[in-house]
Amino acid sequence: MQSFDAIVIGAGVIGASTAYHLAALGASSVLVLDRGMIGNGTTSQSSGILRTHYSVPENIDLALKSWSVFTNFAEYLGDDEASCGLVKCGYMITAPEGDRLSPLRESIEHQRSLGIEVRLVDQKEAQEILPIAQFSDAALTGFEPEAGFADAYMTTTSFIKAARRRGVTVRENINVIRLLIEGGKVTGVETDAGTFLSNTVISTQNIWASEIQGWTGVSIPLKPERHAVLSLEGPKPYTYSMPVFKDLGSPGMLYCRSYGGNQMLVSEGVVGDALNAPDTTQGDIPLDYILDVGAQVAERFPSFETAGLASSWTGVYDVTPDWNPVIGPLPGIEGLFVGFGFSGHGFKLSPAVGKILAQSALGKPTDVSLVPYSFERFASGALLVGKYGLGAVS
């Protein structure tokens, strides 16, 4: 049986980042195990949006630290060929009069207090920045120029490549059957390919993190939730120079961005369809849903009233009760660390999350406090609830 300094379960973007940072921080032997292929789970379904706008203040720090990695990705990994596919187009968010106006103003003010470049724009300037949209109902619009989107799969494989250069072992198509625990301490994992020993195990299993409950008896507050993503092609292109857009005025709190430099990628930022079990199989997207989202899009983007559906897919979120992640040690099991429940935020926070998970697992001070993200918050009631209500904008 092989022994390792640390074992990471899951080779999505969070697991890849964690493995890289474990090695970069001094772990001499790291093993990554994945039930499938690198980055082929929920990571491959990500819309890839990057922003620092959050109504949960704790997330802003993670987003800022992650953005600094995305904007210097090749240098950060020490690989001139590494790429995250970054498109720096900015991020715009708008709200009409109503219950989301005050939260938006407070969130923007908090961003600005941290020195983040975000400015308020009037209806005229908003339309100049995003000319295919109309802003007649916009009571408040913020624009964050240092934002955009990137490619989650490219990011994941680049982290894995950099991790392998540092000696990390990655094994694909291996199922972890159970966690080995002796006297309340982790000693390794049993898989369908044998047993691997380590006193440190980090679970980055995303929607499959509920397996931890069967291994440890600890109740995991997590549910998988399916969301649909549409790609629309209208008479006017949604170009790469146009910002990612968040519409707090739409019933579905739509988010959209350029897709392929011409089409619009769009999805809702509200509660999706709960699944009985984790499953990344493509789900059906009802015609009624497509028509409803299309109508919401046309309200903001008039030319898209005649848009056609170019493609569509579904993705699955690992959702916690407050729509924010659990990061750090799992109480009661020494040596077990977890990163789950990202609820749609995982990719945009992945560089910083991978680093603080690695720091925590190695017993080092973490760049960001793990207290707000602790498992215990669900019992204490110290939840990380976003000001816009439940949903991926947080």
Image (cartoon, grey):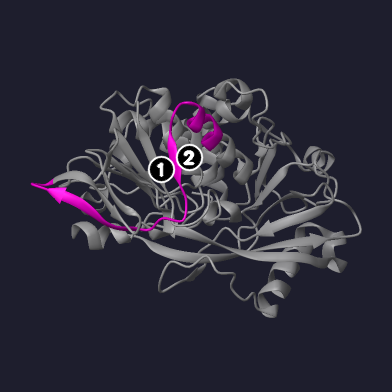
Answer with left or right where residue 187 lies relative to residue 174. Answer: left
Residue drawn 56% across the image and 44% down it: 104
Nearer to us in this view, 301 or 30 = 30
Using the image, determine if residue 301 lies above or below residue 287: above
Q: Quadrant of the N terminus?
A: top left
> Does the CB distance between marks 1 and 2 fall below 8 Å?
yes
Query: Which quadrant of the figure has residue 299?
Result: bottom right
Residue 124 in picture, x, y percent from top left? 82, 40
Answer with left or right where residue 83 lies relative to residue 105. Answer: right
Nearer to us in this view, 106 or 8 = 8
Answer with left or right where residue 3 lies relative to residue 388. Answer: left
Residue 369 in picture, x, y percent from top left? 33, 31
Residue drawn 80% across the image and 52% down it: 134
Where is mark 2, residue-wise?
16
Q: Is residue 178 magenta?
A: yes
Answer with left or right where residue 331 lies relative to residue 146. Answer: left
Using the image, determine if residue 307 lies above or below residue 239: below
Residue drawn 55% across the image and 69% down it: 281
Where is mark 1, residue-wise?
32
Nearer to us in this view, 181 or 55 = 181
Query: Which quadrant of the figure has residue 293?
Result: bottom right
* Span colored in magenta: 159-184
Q: Is residue 213 magenta?
A: no
- Label 1: element kind: strand
Q: CA distance from mark 1 to mark 2?
A: 8 Å
Amino acid type, mark 2: Ala
Residue drawn 69% across the image and 47% down it: 245
